[in-house]
Amino acid sequence: MPQDAFTLNFISKELASLLTGGKISKITQQGKDLLTFIIYTRKGSVKLEICLSAKGCRVNLSDGEVIAPKVAPGFCMLLRKHLQNAEITRVGQVDGERIIFFDFDCTSEFELTKMTLYAELMGKYSNAVLTQNGVIVGALKSTAIGESTKRVLFTGAKYTLPEPQDKIEPNDLKGIKELFENRAGDRAKIIADGVRGVSYATALDILTAYGEEVSAEQAFNYLNSKDIEPCVVFADGEPIDFKVRSFSTDKKLYGDILSAQTAYYARVTEKANFADKVRKLQGALSSSVKKLEKRRAVMEQKLLDCDGLENIKLKGELITANIYLIERGAESFEAVNYYDEAGAKIKIALDRSLSPADNAQKYFKRYAKLKRTVTSVTEQKRETEERLNYLYSISSHLNLAENLCDLEEIEEELKILNILKDDKKDKKKVEKTLPFRSFVCGGFRIIAGRNNVQNDRLLKSLAPDDLWLHTQGYHSAHVGIICGGKTVPDEVLKTACEICAFYSDGRYGTKIPVDYVKRAQVKKPPKANAGFVIYNGYKTALAEPNAHAGLRQE
């Protein structure tokens, strides 16, 4: 739900009940628009977030981890200077505005001062402003002295609220009646445009509650009712909003609005963090892949340049075979190509400054050099293609990742390959027990790896008689069927093949070939890349990709 004044009225009251009397323990600024406060309250320590980005601006509680930057930004340092250990004396909402304020008693060694922090949640104009006695001490986003703006926001200036909108107050029944009488069209738009502090999303909730022809009295009752039913609304299994009250049938109820808001933004933040990490990993991986592809192209060109290798050797041999016929100082001569059944002649260029024998040696030396080049470049090309294939497999697993957990070991892989910088000071230890994707079908357990590192671990976890599966011709997760000494039914094997096909590059295709074999027939060569194996004695089945979410045990 947009943080409109209607919603913030309820949020501010709950924040006031929880935070009043609390003391600021820690202040961090994660990114340019996210302030985080750890506050000791009567009910224990809580984490308050003030997000001031253009999208997603909000004041909410959070259970997430606080990651402090190495160097605190200037505004964060200012807040620490004045608000560290300060007591919250009041939390409220500026009447009718998308602004929540926090009053503080700030105790220093010499005096007690009173300060106020305003969190202005106004889209791209969102800001945080710290004041003392109505004068700005500092702002997250300041205005320059000479800048043309309606509001002056720099240190030492008087803090002024945004100009009030020319709208009807939500508690003015007469005004709402006149609004409905004087305007026609979309009632939700009429309410959002005409009633102060009400967003279009809240106006749509009013229409959902009372219908398209909602009356002024009904709109008034909705906006002024004290009854709430905090919830998170879902669509297709994903949370799409949190509400003060909702008539949706697909929702999860919470005891208070702060809890519903925390749950909703936890999922929003997780999705945003997931998308950010995927972009980071894909960017680093894509850069390495492009370099290797460029290197491979150079090698292919070198091999192409060596394409006439045998012809150069032949010319040296023909010079040697006809050396008694070649005059010193000749520019060229023709000789019969004794490898040609038709006995065709070949013209051979000569260096006039060299003797016939030296010309022959020149061709042989050139041949030897090109042969060494071919041998060296062919090996380098093979290694490059192996590396590329490995990076392609990482890219495949990255595209199949479902959550942050799936990305952790992929990130570690890229650090091991020196594709990502490994900052050991900030490095988090990756749990070695990240779970496999797990399914149960017909009494058998099917497991699937999430990345190359897990694929190796999955292989080690299988017993010799368990079945191991992998797509043929596609990068895919390694899949295992835990047999427990029993024969695997066709239906279970079919399900495992479909899961393997789904977690592969062929997931959007049909009739994907999947190889299956006993674990005992699968070997991992020494020093091979993670996820690389060789196997024999396998059989192949054609499978339709299927996630089989209903069988998932995670």
Image (cartoon, helix red, strand yellow):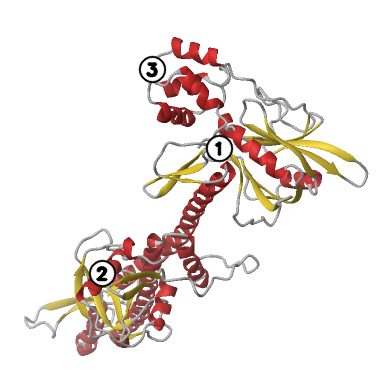
Q: Amino acid at mark 1?
A: Ala
Of circles 1 and 3, the one toward us is 3
Judging by the rendered image, the residue that carries numbered circle 2 is 495
Up the image or down, 372 lies above or below 175; here it is below
Counting from the top left corner in percent of width and height, residue 547 is at: 31, 62
Please tell me which residue is depicted at 39% across the width and 71% down the height of the picture. 449
Of the two numbered discs 2 and 1 on the same chain, state the one appearing first in sequence: 1
Q: Earlier in the sequence, mark 2 or mark 3?
A: 3
User: From mark 2 to mark 1, how far is it between C-alphas?
Assistant: 46 Å
Image coordinates for residue 435, horizontal then vertical, percent: 45, 71
Name the residue type under label 2.
Thr
Q: Secondary structure at mark 3?
A: loop
Q: Which image quarter: residue 106?
A: top right
Q: Which residue is identified by label 1?
A: 54
The span from disc 2 to disc 3 (Cα, nearest Å) is: 54 Å
Label 1: element kind: loop
User: Which label number is shown at residue 185?
Assistant: 3
- Above or below residue 426? Residue 463 is below
Within 10 Å of disc 3 (Cα), the crowding (few <14, some 14-19, many 20+) is few
Q: Is residue 198 visible?
A: no
